[in-house]
Amino acid sequence: MKTIATIAMIFLLGIFVHAQPNCLPVYGNPVKQLSVNDSLKIAYTEKGKGETILFIHGLAGNISHWEKNIETLSKHFHCIAVDLPGYGHSVTRVSSPLQDQLEMYADVVLSFIKIMNIKKLTIAGHSMGGQIAIIAALKNPGAIHKLVLVAPAGFETFSVTEADFLKNISTPAFFKSQDETAIRGSFKKNFYLQPADTEKLIAYRIAMKQCTGFDAWCGNIVNGIKGMLAHPVKTQLSRLHQKVLILFGENDELIPNKYLHPDMTTAAIAADGSKLISDHTLLMIPQAGHFLQFEKPADVNAAVINFLAN
């Protein structure tokens, strides 16, 4: 009887596992774990040697969003990419008591840097990850040598009324209810011409709907949006003393917000924010959307290599 019960349990466990396909994304490099405190482990990958670049993904992203860049840049640099808490292989549930999840993310990044004992560090952040990189650089400027901001959030600002509107429409139920058509539409908005290999990212996002951590994942997205709105950084950009490379796609459909700011342009927002940073280089990548490091990796990689060489 004991043997039968054991076999039945294994069978049921097999059904449970197969009912939740692709709940953890597959990366091109081995996943490691680092405890940043007693209750939180961060997943990361690393490849290459030399000066370190730490890659931070954006809202609803994970390490895979940087893999086209790491493949090339790891031939020149020590590349580390992290899954922010609540994403990828990092812990599922995240609480942000002050509704400022970006503050928490920045603290986690700084703890990670300290524990890893990284010196002369460049942080590369995409979208929300760019805003997190800015916050971390402001909190501990001595820990960060240079910044690479790829379509960074935080350059575009929102009034109290606009922020309240965005928070009201950004609910866990909204993201939970997105079907395949809506998911594909959301991805398409990130590109000028969507690369064929975006399909693997879309497939993972669709599969996540069947995962046990999906509700928490939707909640993390909402907290990330609230955190971006709660922690505007534009007024603090003049305090950045690091050398900063700023990259935007000329055809970004997400910055500016087309509904709230229809008369603004990506180029104007990029220029307006960049001029506040004393030591910066701004590059606008043609025929590229918001997810430009995935759409135009060769252009982004070349810009990063040139930036870090000087």
Image (tube, rainbow, N blue to C red):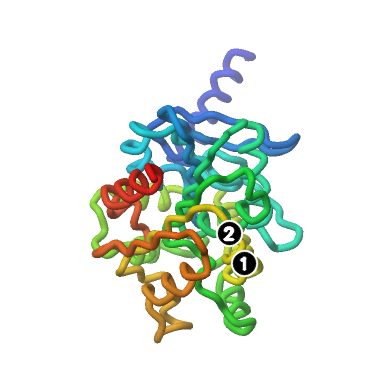
Left or right for 204, reference 6: left
Q: Which residue is mark 1?
A: 236
The crowd level at tag 2 (other Cα within 10 Å; few <14, some 14-19, many 20+) is many
Q: CA distance from mark 2 to mark 1?
A: 7 Å
Left or right for 188, reference 4: left
In x, y percent, where is residue 212?
A: 57, 45
Q: Residue at x 57, y 35 (%)?
A: 119
Q: For the N terminus, which image quadrant?
A: top right
Q: Relative to the observer, which residue lies in front, 70 or 241?
A: 241
In x, y percent, where is residue 149?
A: 46, 56
Left or right for 195, reference 78: left
Look at the image and tell me whether residue 21 can be seen.
Answer: no
In the rendered view, tell whether residue 162 sits above or below residue 73: below
Look at the image and tell me whether residue 168 can be seen.
Answer: yes
In the rendered view, tell whether residue 44 sits above or below residue 126: above
In the rendered view, tell whether residue 40 sits above or below residue 303: above
In x, y percent, where is residue 166?
A: 56, 75
Disc sitting over residue 23 in the figure: none
In x, y percent, where is residue 136?
A: 62, 52
Q: Residue at x 40, y 29 (%)?
A: 48
Q: Relative to the observer, which residue lies in front, 150 or 242?
A: 242
Q: Residue at x 44, y 40 (%)?
A: 25
Helix, strand or loop under label 2: loop
Q: Label 2 sits on what residue type?
A: Leu
The answer to which image quadrant residue 226 occupies is bottom right
Q: Relative to the observer, which residue lies in front, 115 or 235?
A: 235
Helix, strand or loop under label 1: helix
Q: Which residue is mark 2?
A: 240
Q: Residue at x 61, y 71 (%)?
A: 235
Q: Label 1 sits on what residue type?
A: Gln
Whether the residues at callouts 2 and 1 have beta carbons within 8 Å, the answer is yes
The crowd level at tag 1 (other Cα within 10 Å; few <14, some 14-19, many 20+) is few
